[in-house]
Image (spheres, rainbow, N blue to C red):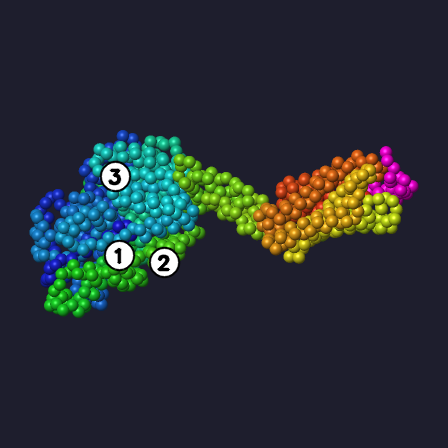
């Protein structure tokens, strides 16, 4: 019931009779004094919220306020609501196109913000013969427009419900969503709520807390104050208010959502005032107050000089309003002598201007004599506004809505007997509560240029204005529209806000306020909720390795895509660079040069052995095996080059299989040489049967069989799961490694395992034959070469498994070169030494000489 003043339609089942003359004579001395009526063919009822009755004055033990509370305290600002209804009726009566030949009148009673008088005023309006009242005729009452506040509306609705009169009350959910959009726009996620303790406020809290929490809004506090019901309660309530006020200003929440009735701020202004009286040591901090649509900046007469700086910078939600042409001039024309039947203006005038009319003193108001020529423009904003407020605008539009509905009903083609009014409009003889049907879906343009529409539920399709309150020490008050909420737009586009037009409280030094429990977590950090506290209160922790956060206040860090990696500060993802062991980089170039150098050395050794093939040293150790071993070592060195460069499909298929087969031939040649040496010495013993095994056939068989076994393993590898080019995006944090995926690592380790088996057998046989009595025993050198070979490949496995990317390839190349160089150096360097440097030892006698 906050979006606009409640429009309560009271439509009687009686037919419209002749124009009445409303003359009510009051017999009960306790009946309200405030009444305003204007004659007409059809009567609009009004329930105004104009005055507050106080049973006795309040005496202050400390510094008193400028004046005491009066027995009858007028809320001067609300007098404009009465003028808005009168102005709308005046315009309608002057419009020949709308309700022709029919005049509207009205009868307005004051609710006194009190349940008793609200109910009493309602009964006065709807009762043809009210007790203790004498009225000349029945009133042609067609509607009641009233209920400024939800509580007032509730008392009116309770009575109307008994008589089954249709009622309309707008929903508040659109406003709440607009407030939520505003909070999210400014990223105000740590806020407080201040309400007065009643059913409507509790309903408000129960609605907005889960709604806002779903969008990440937390609540620093939810405070409920009380309005005084009895004079004896006031001091205790003020003490409570001071505590609430100090709690608000000591809170880290810089944004406070205030929900209350239209005159709630008049009570709220007691909090800082009473805090001053108690000489509070707390210096008031600036806050951003967000006011709901029902709240207005109103003041009682005794608050005329009270400071309003605390309200500077308020952002207020109000139903969209405009200033109808001529309204300001209409208000300016008002003075205490002009209206007839206006029982409100004298009290308004006396309390608003602080003067008295002779014989018209109300309560304890004392001052100069009222001349009636005082200017309404001179009143401060909290007392009166010349521009039509949103509440008055709703009343203005409500009157027009009833008039247009009456006009539509009068021109409808319902087949009933018509009834004439003054020979003008025709109303068919039908229950006038059916006027409610014509209100649904009605749409019209008012004189202010706004299109007013009601939906099928009777709710006005109006948006909200967001106004910024600008106040100063001299009580000047100005509302500046800084945004709005379009209730018909999609949720993401409903809010419009002009941040540059907002004037914040001076305490913020015109910088946009921040309202968070914890400062924002910078990119590169994520939030960790503090246990036992609201989810808006958290610690900021760095993102773990491999993850980033690129926005503020992220709940969790996330991993980059496979082809990207986090930067140093873990705020963005950087594209990984593709890398492989290339010939251009130092590591690849050095390994390639080493492979070629060793291959060249091997070729030289082969050339030496071929050139000296007929010497005893070469002939003594099976020349064919020696040539085969040298050629296989040459190919081993060159096979390392397959592992360097861009890994394409061909090189991936060849590199491991070629390496495995060639190395198997080399190791099998070593094994064959070792076995040949052993058998040769065993065959020299008398009667030995080993002589028939000594020869080229055994050696060739060993080499061939070992080669074939490795070839079968490699063939199965290529058939079942061949190696293929692959882009490894996970092994290296900042690189995409272009590599050869081995397919199935089982076959890879089978190849290595088979070579290791051959090497182990060769080492074992050579070790057993190391002490054979010969001056040139090759078994010793083979033993040492196999020791080097096995050491290299045993260390290869952990080194290979712990390496990543191109360094895995480099480890394998190094192992190939190191093991091959070990075989070349340990087996052939002694022979080359004799052939080249000690040719005198290269003879048969030295070779066969026994130690």
Looking at marks 3 and 1 on the same chain, the residue that comes earlier in the sequence is marked by 3
Q: Local crowd at mark 2 within 10 Å, few (<14), some, or many (≥20)? A: few
Q: Helix or strand or loop: what does disc 2 sit on?
A: loop
Residue 834 seen from this side? yes
Residue at image position (81%, 37%) is 685
Which mark's residue is nearer the viewer, 3 or 1? 1
Can you give x and y, in whole percent of width and height, for residue 604 in the image?
83, 49
Say if mark 3 contacts mark 2, CB within 8 Å: no
Q: In the drawing, what numbered circle is on residue 227?
A: 3
How far apart are the two marked residues, 3 and 2, measured between alpha carbons?
Answer: 38 Å
Q: Helix or strand or loop: what does disc 3 sit on?
A: loop
Looking at marks 3 and 2 on the same chain, the residue that comes earlier in the sequence is marked by 3
Can you give x and y, in whole percent of width and height, for residue 39 in the image?
15, 58
Give the image quarter of residue 106. bottom left
Residue beneath disc 1: 459
Which mark's residue is nearer the viewer, 3 or 2? 2
Say if mark 3 contacts mark 1, CB within 8 Å: no
């Amino acid at each position: 019931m906050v979006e606009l003043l409640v429009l309560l339609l009271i439509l009687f089942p009686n037919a419209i009779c002749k124009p009445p003359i409303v003359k009510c004579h009051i017999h009960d001395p306790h009946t309200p004094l405030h009444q305003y009526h204007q004659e007409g063919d059809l009567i609009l009822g009004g329930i105004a919220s104009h005055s507050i009755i106080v049973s006795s004055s309040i005496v202050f033990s400390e510094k008193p306020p400028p004046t005491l509370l009066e027995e009858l305290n007028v809320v001067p600002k609300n007098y404009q609501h009465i003028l808005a209804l009168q102005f709308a009726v005046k315009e309608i009566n002057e419009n020949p196109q709308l309700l022709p030949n029919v005049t509207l009148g009205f009868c307005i009673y004051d609710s006194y913000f009190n349940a008793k008088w609200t109910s009493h005023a309602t009964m006065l309006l709807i009762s043809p013969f009210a007790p203790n009242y004498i009225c000349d005729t029945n009133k042609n009452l067609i509607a009641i427009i009233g209920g400024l506040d939800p509580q007032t509306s509730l008392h009116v609705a309770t009575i109307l419900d008994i008589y089954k009169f249709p009622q309309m009350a707008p929903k508040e959910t659109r406003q709440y969503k607009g407030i939520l959009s505003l909070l999210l726009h400014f990223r105000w996620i740590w806020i407080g709520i201040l309400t007065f303790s009643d059913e409507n406020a509790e309903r408000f809290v129960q609605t907005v807390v889960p709604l806002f929490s779903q969008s990440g809004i937390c609540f620093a506090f939810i405070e409920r104050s009380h309005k005084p019901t009895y004079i004896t309660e006031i001091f205790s309530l003020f003490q409570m208010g001071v505590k609430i006020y100090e709690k608000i200003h000591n809170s880290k929440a810089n944004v406070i959502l205030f929900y209350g009735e239209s005159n709630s701020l008049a009570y709220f202004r007691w909090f800082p005032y009473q805090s001053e009286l108690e000489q509070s040591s707390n210096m008031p901090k600036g806050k951003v107050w967000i006011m709901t649509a029902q709240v207005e900046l109103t003041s009682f007469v005794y608050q005329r000089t009270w400071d309003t700086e605390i309200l500077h910078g308020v952002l207020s939600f109000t139903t969209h309003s405009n200033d109808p042409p001529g309204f300001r001039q209409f208000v300016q024309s008002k003075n205490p002598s002009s209206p007839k039947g206006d029982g409100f203006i004298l009290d308004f005038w006396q309390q608003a201007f602080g003067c008295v009319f002779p014989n018209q003193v109300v309560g304890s108001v004392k001052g100069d004599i009222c001349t009636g020529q005082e200017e309404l423009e001179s009143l401060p904003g909290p007392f009166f506004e010349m521009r039509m407020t949103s509440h008055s605008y709703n009343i203005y539009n409500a009157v027009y809505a009833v008039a247009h509905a009456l006009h539509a009903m009068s021109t409808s083609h319902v087949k009933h007997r018509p009834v004439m009014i003054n020979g003008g409009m025709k109303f068919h003889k039908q229950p006038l509560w059916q006027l409610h049907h014509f209100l649904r879906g009605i749409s019209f343009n008012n004189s202010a240029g706004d299109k007013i529409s009601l939906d099928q539920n009777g709710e006005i399709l109006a948006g909200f204005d967001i106004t910024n309150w600008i106040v100063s020490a001299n009580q000047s008050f100005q509302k500046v529209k800084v945004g709005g909420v379009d209730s018909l737009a999609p949720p993401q586009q409903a809010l419009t806000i002009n941040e540059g037009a907002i004037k914040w409280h001076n305490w913020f030094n015109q910088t946009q306020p921040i309202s968070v429990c914890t400062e924002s977590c910078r990119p590169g950090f994520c939030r960790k909720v503090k246990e036992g506290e609201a989810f808006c209160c958290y610690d900021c922790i760095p993102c773990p390795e491999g993850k980033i956060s690129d926005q503020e206040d992220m709940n969790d860090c996330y991993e980059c895509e496979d082809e990207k990696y986090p930067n140093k500060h873990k705020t963005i993802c950087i594209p990984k660079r593709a890398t492989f062991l290339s010939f251009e980089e130092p590591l690849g170039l050095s390994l390639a040069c080493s492979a070629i150098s060793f291959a060249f050395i091997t070729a030289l050794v082969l050339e030496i052995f071929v050139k000296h093939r007929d010497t005893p040293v070469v002939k003594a150790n099976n020349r064919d095996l020696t040539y085969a071993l040298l050629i296989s070592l040459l190919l081993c060195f060159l096979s390392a080059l397959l592992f360097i460069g861009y890994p394409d499909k061909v090189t991936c298929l060849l590199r491991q299989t070629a390496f495995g087969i060639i190395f198997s031939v080399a190791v099998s040649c070593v094994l064959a040489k070792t076995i040949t040496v052993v058998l040769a010495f065993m065959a020299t013993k008398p009667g030995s049967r080993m002589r028939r095994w000594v020869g080229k056939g055994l050696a060739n068989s060993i080499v061939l069989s070992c080669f074939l076994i490795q070839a079968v393993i490699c063939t199965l590898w290529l058939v079942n799961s061949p190696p293929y080019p692959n882009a490894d995006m996970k092994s290296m944090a900042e690189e995409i490694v272009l590599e050869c995926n081995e397919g199935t690592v089982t076959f890879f380790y089978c190849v290595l395992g088979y070579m290791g088996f051959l090497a182990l057998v060769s080492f074992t046989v050579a070790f057993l034959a190391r002490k054979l009595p010969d001056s040139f025993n090759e078994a010793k050198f083979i033993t040492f070469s196999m020791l080097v070979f096995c050491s290299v490949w045993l260390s290869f496995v952990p080194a290979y498994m712990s390496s990543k990317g191109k360094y895995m390839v480099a480890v394998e190349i190094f192992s190939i070169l190191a093991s091959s160089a070990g075989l070349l150096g340990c087996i052939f360097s002694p022979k080359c030494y004799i052939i080249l440097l000690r040719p005198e030892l290269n003879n048969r006698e030295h070779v066969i000489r026994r130690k």
